Structures are given as structure tokens and as C-alpha cells.
């Protein structure tokens, strides 16, 4: 049983015009027992700092951290019952895999047979059984990372913290280790917090995702790490809170078009600002009508603006610029005259000639609108 509660958590460092630089501003999150929480965001948005405050490796400037309802702000790291896995796994090079796994337990004066038992169990879970006598230099990067995870497992902590543990691995190994960590979470039934800058890891691993960003504070002229949205991966994908979240999660990213909503004889349409040509008929809904005449940003995911074989009611024309066959699907890069966008399609279309005009069909039900001033997604 392990819940983690972060209430109004701040990390500030001395410096700047005001004498205080804010790395993390007002972080709030209630983590339930056995959740797999992912912190995702671009470099410098405060992910590691927040994780290190939870681990006790950084002091908490303001706010409260509780684990299982007990305030932990001033508890030393070793007494927080937490284990952390880093990007730079830093194994002891002169010790064997067994000794690396046993090291922390020995320090804690764990009885020998208990060490044996725990190391054997971790080695079994991670498939390290055959490697226990090797030293790290005889291991691959993936195997080293597995030993680093093993060191956390043998501690049997209440909470596991991972800080970009897969960043040093090659692409194939990353995908494999990603699956292993998901399985590990299921098997250990432990609470885990996982930091990554990779939106695909966030989408595939998290029971909930915390999207963070570094945002300029006009008062200080400095960037500060803030939380942009907390929710399940699919909820964030389909209902992003704002432009940043909409553009950060999803690959290729969401397309954005600036324009205005108009009521025309044919129905509701979205017209790009001049010299744009995008005219998008939309289903009429009361909430959509509320935005008539306003400057808006239309957001369309690449899979929601596909090539249409022929002209349909909800389509628009654009100039094809490039065809990118991905094997399992085809990306079309096109331009409306005002905005470039990407369209995700089933395989085929390789013979389409760049420079030609094409019809693109829009899934208007999946169109998002954002307020350019506040950046927030508008209800439609
Ligand atoms: P992330 O892990 O998301 O890439 P970090 O948490 O490492 O980001 O850093 C967040 C911000 O805090 C960065 O702007 C970084 O420069 C700043 N920062 C981190 N450590 C210190 C420190 N010791 N002194 C001042 N600023 C720091
Ligand atoms: Mg970091």
C-alpha cells in the first residue's frame, strides 16, 4: 500500500532579479496505490527536480509531500522507503551482478539468507539468473539497465521512481525494456513514478500522465516548470487542455490552422485567415455557434484529415508537397495556402505527384478549437 500526495510543491533556487528562481511551481497531484504515473515534458520543465523532491535528493522549498498520509518533507531519503532508477545507472564496475544487486541490502545489514532470497527473486523477474557472476563490462546496455532496475526491486520499496531510465538504450532495446517495465509494474503491484521526455513512452506506459512545460514568467523573465494537464493517456490525447498539450502528445503532431468561424447559407464553416483556402463545414452545435466571428485556432490530428478520393461535404483542397511511405501507413505533407499540415493515411498513394491539388476529408467530430489568447481548448 503506497499513496503519494504532492500539495502545492515548489522548488526554488537562489538567483534571478527577484532573488529566487522557480524550477517547479505549485505542483499538485494525488497518486493512488499501484498507479503508474508518468511525468512527461520537454527538457528543463522540472520533471527530475520534482522526482528528486519525492526521493529526498532535493529539499522541498514550499508545499507538502506525504507518503501513505505521512508528511515526508524532512525525512531523509533512506527512510522514505523509495527506490530510484536513473538514466545513468552507474553500476559498480568491479562488483559482479550479484554483488551489485546485493550492495544496498548489505549496507542495511540485511541477513545473508534474506539477501540471497531477494537477489534470486529479482534476478528471476528480470532474467538475470545466468549473469549473476559477470561484471558490468561483460553486459550489454540493456542488461546493465536491468541490473539497475534489479537494485531497486531487491529493496522492496513502497514507491519506485524512474528518471528517464531508457534514454541511453538504442531504439529496439528501449521498446523491449518499455514492455518489461510495464510487466514489472503489473507483477510487483507497486506504485511507480516514471519520468520521460518521450511522449510515446508516456502514452504507452502511464495509467495517468502528468504533462509539464517550462513557461515564461513575465514578472521574472525566467521559465518555470508547471503542470499543464493530468489525466489518462487517451483522455489527454482526445481532450487536450490547451495548445501545448495538444501539440506535445501525438506523432506526427496535431495540425493547427488559424481562422474564423462563419455562419453561411451552406452551414457553419471555418475559414482560414487570408490568404488561406481552408473551408471546413462543421456540424452545427450550440457551443460551436458561440464562437462565430472569433479568431480561433483549429486543431486536427493527422489521422482526422485524410485524403478523400473525391469531393465530399466535409472536405477541403490543398496542395500536396511530399509523400512519405512509412510501410504500415503513408504520411502526406500538404499546404492549404496559409498552413502546412500532415495527413495520415492507409498504405498507398505513393504515386501521387507533389504539386497537385488534393481533396482532404475531415473528421469534423474530432476537430478541436483553441482560443489564441488563452491557448485553452474551447468546448464545442
Ligand atoms: P527536466 O528533468 O524536466 O529536464 P530539471 O528538473 O532537471 O528538468 O530542471 C528544471 C529546471 O531547474 C531547469 O531550468 C534547471 O536549469 C533548473 N535547475 C536544476 N537544478 C538547479 C540548481 N541546482 N540550481 C539552479 N537551477 C537548477
Ligand atoms: Mg531530467
Image (spheres, rainbow, N blue to C red):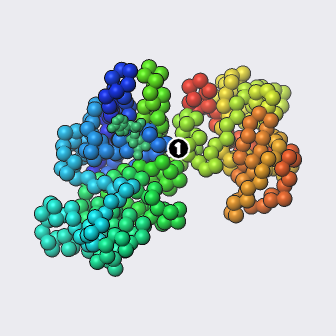
The answer to whether residue 94 is visible is: yes
Q: Nearer the viewer, residue 288 or 22?
A: 22
Residue at 28% across / 55% down in the picture?
83
Q: Secondary structure at mark 1?
A: helix
Residue at 48% across / 28% down in the picture?
216
Query: Is the CB of the residue bearing disc 1 within 8 angstroms of ligand 1?
Result: no
Question: Is residue 356 shown above or below 92?
Answer: above
Where residue 272 sits in the image (x, y, percent)? 76, 30
The answer to whether residue 8 is visible is: no
Residue at far bottom of view: 130
Q: Residue 282 falls in which quadrant of the image? A: top right
The answer to whether 217 appears left or right of 73 in the picture is: right
The answer to whether 310 appears left or right of 259 in the picture is: right
Residue at 56% across / 43% down in the picture?
248
Ligand 1, by image quadrant, is: top left
* Residue that numbered label 1 is attached to: 236
Amino acid at each position: 500500500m503506497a499513496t503519494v500526495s504532492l500539495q502545492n510543491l515548489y522548488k526554488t533556487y537562489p538567483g534571478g532579479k527577484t532573488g529566487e528562481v522557480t524550477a517547479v511551481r505549485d505542483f499538485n497531484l494525488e497518486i493512488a496505490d499501484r498507479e503508474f504515473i508518468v511525468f512527461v515534458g520537454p527538457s528543463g520543465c522540472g520533471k527530475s527536480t520534482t522526482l528528486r523532491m519525492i526521493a529526498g535528493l532535493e529539499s522541498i522549498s514550499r508545499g507538502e509531500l506525504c507518503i501513505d498520509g505521512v508528511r515526508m518533507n524532512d525525512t531523509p531519503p533512506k527512510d522514505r522507503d523509495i527506490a530510484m532508477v536513473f538514466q545513468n545507472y552507474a553500476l559498480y564496475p568491479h562488483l559482479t551482478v550479484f554483488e551489485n544487486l546485493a550492495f544496498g541490502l548489505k549496507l542495511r545489514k540485511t541477513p545473508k539468507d534474506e539477501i540471497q532470497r531477494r537477489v534470486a527473486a529479482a534476478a528471476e523477474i528480470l532474467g538475470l539468473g545466468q549473469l549473476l557472476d559477470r561484471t558490468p563490462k561483460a553486459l550489454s546496455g540493456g542488461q546493465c539497465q536491468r541490473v539497475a532496475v534489479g537494485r531497486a526491486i531487491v529493496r522492496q520499496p513502497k514507491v519506485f521512481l524512474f528518471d528517464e531510465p531508457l534514454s541511453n538504450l538504442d531504439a529496439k532495446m528501449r521498446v523491449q525494456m518499455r514492455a518489461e517495465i510495464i510487466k514489472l509494474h503489473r507483477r510487483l503491484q507497486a506504485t511507480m513514478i516514471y519520468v520521460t521526455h518521450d511522449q510515446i513512452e508516456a502514452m504507452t506506459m502511464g495509467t495517468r500522465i502528468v504533462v509539464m512545460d517550462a513557461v515564461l514568467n513575465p514578472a521574472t523573465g525566467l521559465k518555470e516548470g508547471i503542470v499543464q494537464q493530468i489525466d489518462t493517456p487517451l483522455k489527454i490525447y482526445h481532450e487536450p487542455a490547451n495548445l501545448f498539450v495538444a501539440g506535445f502528445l501525438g506523432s506526427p503532431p496535431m495540425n493547427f490552422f488559424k481562422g474564423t468561424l462563419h455562419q453561411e447559407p451552406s452551414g457553419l464553416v471555418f475559414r482560414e485567415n487570408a490568404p488561406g483556402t481552408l473551408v471546413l463545414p462543421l456540424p452545427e452545435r450550440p457551443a460551436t455557434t458561440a464562437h462565430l466571428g472569433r479568431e480561433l485556432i483549429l486543431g486536427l490530428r493527422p489521422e482526422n484529415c485524410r485524403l478523400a478520393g473525391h469531393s465530399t461535404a466535409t472536405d477541403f483542397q490543398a496542395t500536396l508537397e511530399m509523400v512519405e511511405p512509412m510501410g504500415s501507413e503513408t504520411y502526406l505533407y500538404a499546404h492549404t495556402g496559409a498552413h502546412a499540415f500532415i495527413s495520415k493515411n492507409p498504405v498507398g498513394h505513393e504515386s501521387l505527384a507533389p504539386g497537385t491539388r488534393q481533396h482532404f476529408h475531415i473528421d469534423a467530430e474530432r476537430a478541436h478549437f483553441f482560443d489564441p489568447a488563452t491557448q485553452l481548448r474551447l468546448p464545442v
